[in-house]
Amino acid sequence: MIKAYWNLHKKCWSVMNSKGRVIKHCDYLILRNCTFIVRPAGRERVLKTKRKNVHAFIKGEEYEPPELPLGDKRVRYNPYENPFFTLDGRRIDSAPFMFLMNDGKAYTLMT
């Protein structure tokens, strides 16, 4: 399992191993068996200081499918609005597949 987050400084996805060490940077990534993680203390620090920090991740298995349709539902996280990831304005805790795109947006196949 790996964790991925959008790196605001490098404008790419940073990928961490299970020990929390960044092992690579990439423009796009496909994950399966995903869960969404928000560290409450990190979010509170963002709300208090108005400065972003790494505290929200998408955890999953890196996946290179032979063929899979592109996700069409955008998953979002905004620490100023909610303490969790959202899909169509509702909380989302997991997804079967996530498509992490080169513009920092994340999509799923869920309907």
Image (cartoon, helix red, strand yellow):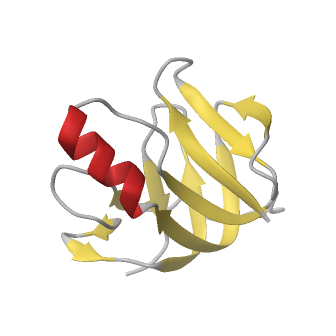
Drawn side of residue 99 relative to residue 92, left or right? right
Q: Is residue 29 shown above or below 108?
A: above
Q: How many marks?
A: 0
Q: Quadrant of the C terminus?
A: bottom left
Q: Is residue 14 shown above or below 95?
A: above
**Residue 23 or 111: which is nearer the viewer?**
23
Q: Residue at x 50, y 68 (%)?
A: 36
Where is residue 49? Give x, y as percent: 23, 33
Q: Residue at x 56, y 44 (%)?
A: 5
Where is residue 105? Give x, y as percent: 42, 44
Q: Quadrant of the N terminus?
A: bottom right
Residue 84 falls in image quadrant: bottom left
**Residue 109 or 94: which is nearer the viewer?**
94
Drawn side of residue 8 relative to residue 16, left or right? left
Drawn side of residue 98 relative to residue 1, left or right? left
Residue 48 falls in image quadrant: top left
Q: Residue at x 81, y 54 (%)?
A: 19
Where is residue 73? Give x, y as percent: 37, 64
**Residue 69 or 3: which is nearer the viewer?**
3
Q: Residue furthest top?
A: 9
Q: Is residue 101 shown above or below 68?
A: above
Where is residue 23? Give x, y as percent: 83, 37
**Residue 44 or 22: which is nearer the viewer?**
44
